[in-house]
Image (cartoon, rainbow, N blue to C red):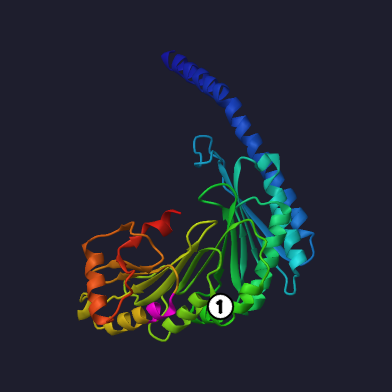
Amino acid sequence: MLGLIVLALAIAMCVWVIKSGAPQALATMQANFQQQSAIDRAIDRIHQLPGIQSVQAQRSDANPRAHDADGRRAHVRIQVATKPGITTAQLAAAAQAIRIAWTDPNLANTVGNGVISVPRGATFTLTARPTQKQLANELKYWAAVQAATGTPLNLTIAPATDGPGYARVLAPVKNTAAATTAFLSNYSKVLAVTDVSSAHPSWTMPGIRIDGSLPPASLISLTSKLTSLEPLVPPIPADGDRGFAIEWTHVGKGVAHATVVLYDRDPNSLNDSRNWSAVVDSTRAVIAAKIPSIGIRYVGATSGQLTLGGCKDTVSTDDQDTTLVTALMISASGLPKSTLAGHCVDAATK
């Protein structure tokens, strides 16, 4: 008798739990169904477009208790493969279809990620939500700079990290010295490409990192000169990499500033390093280039920074910076009078 009473209580409790959780469970199921229906509609629209080989989509399950920083829950990834010979207009139509998918009310609470693969291995990744006109402009520019350099480039359109709007990132499909060489040798063609973008633009490739507007031709000439003295380092250098990278920053009305980063992986410090002569020769090349605002950052057993010009006396300085300036002043025999130890704060903050 007691067993029957316990069983009855257990059944009653189970029914109560199901009933109490039913509204939330049904709401979650309905939201998931609506999201999946919106995704299916987007897939059908894209698949019917000319130049499309295949379309796939993945959706993570929405978790009512897990939110991203921006409050969205489910992640949706639409992946498109295109046919050989797809035109820029056809590519824009596919990108526009993905953009429209993100505007569906049923996907408003999701994190959208669209990836379009094109011939020659390049990909276009869309995680921001630009307007149709902005999207068309970015794709035209992408096609033009690939034609200018003769190198397949990946294009990413993502939300801006420093304010409203979106960011545009261009990078070679293969992070090789050949990709950088193609960019350097065809730089005049790249400069000639019309760019009406409203994005925060950037480029990243072995030996070059550009944030904002494109650098002057004089900096590209310096980069070419340095390739005869030091190897190009990957966009994310490993511990054992030796070589150089040029960082250029010119965003909006801020100060245009270049930094030559010299990576020396010899365990000995400064002029005791086996690579010190290459560091000195590179420094001399930087001085001779006469870039208005430029600095040098040395990364080795001891690291330091200096600015050669274009900076006021507001710098962040430590003992390693002073040691680097002293060593280069002796070895390079003649740093400009405007040389200051440390990093130029003006260029970083304006």
Identify the secondary structure beneath mark 1: helix
Q: Is residue 289 magenta?
A: yes
* Residue 7 seen in the current view: yes
Q: Position of residue 161 (x, y in %)?
A: 51, 51
Residue at (20% x, 76% y) in the render? 268
Q: How many numbered marks, from 0 up?
A: 1
Q: Amino acid at mark 1?
A: Phe
258 left or right of 198 in image = left
Query: Up-down: is 240 above or below 281?
Result: above
Near-viewer residue (170 or 349): 349
Residue drawn at 24 percent across, 60 percent down: 318
> Picture coordinates of residue 244 (x, y %)?
39, 75
Query: Residue furthest toward the bottom?
Result: 228
Relative vertical location of residue 135 with respect to residue 173 in this rendering, above or below: above
In magenta segment, residue 327 = no
| Residue 195 found in image quarter | bottom right
Say which residue label 1 marks. 183
Q: What residue do we see at 39% from left, 81% from top?
A: 285
Residue sitting nearer the eye, 269 or 113: 269
Residue depicted at x 38% and y 70%: 237
Whether residue 118 is visible to the viewer of this picture, yes or no, is no
Instruction: Classify residue 228 by image quadrant.
Output: bottom left
140 in relation to 73, above or below: below
Quadrant placement of the N terminus: top left
Residue closer to the observer: 348 or 159: 348
Give the quarter of the image for residue 276.
bottom left
Which stretch appears magenta? 285-290
